Amino acid sequence: MNIITAISCLTLVLISIFTTAYFKPEYESAFEADQQCHFEMSTLKVDKPNLGCDHDTETRQWLLFDAERGNQPAEVIKRYKY
């Protein structure tokens, strides 16, 4: 019985650790995410001139996207969660 309890506790702890690590934001504020998005946009602008950054307030992230897709929606290149 003690082994089963120990395994159950260990499993719950591991699930908690992985869940926290997965959902932890990359940046502590919208300002930091904004700065990083615009910095990377400026460094990649030579290869892809139609890049843009947009703030998605519902999901609390900045999106680096390529708008040059013809009749298709923009392609999200990178997400900056905060």
Image: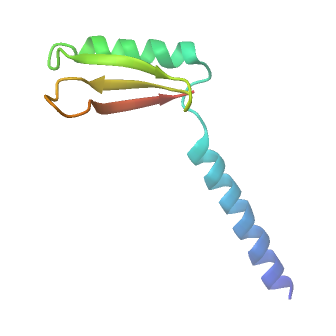
Decide: is 35 above or below 67. above
Q: Total marks drawn?
A: 0
Q: To which quarter of the image does residue 9 belong?
A: bottom right
Q: Is residue 68 left or right of residue 37?
A: left
Q: Position of residue 27 (x, y in %)?
A: 56, 25
Q: Name which residue lies at 46% across and 12% down.
A: 35
Give the answer, above or below, for where 56 lies relative to 15: above
Question: Observer-nearest residue: 5 or 71?
Answer: 71
Q: Residue at x 67, y 61 (%)?
A: 14
Left or right of 42 in this view: 48:
left
x and y percentages locating residue 33 in the rendered image: 50, 19
- Which residue appears at 32% of the width and 32% of the height? 76
Q: Position of residue 10 (x, y in %)?
A: 74, 68
Residue lying at the far bottom in this picture: please name it.
1
Q: On the rendered image, what quadrant is the N terminus found in?
A: bottom right
Q: Residue at x 66, y 61 (%)?
A: 15
Residue 70 position by quadrant = top left
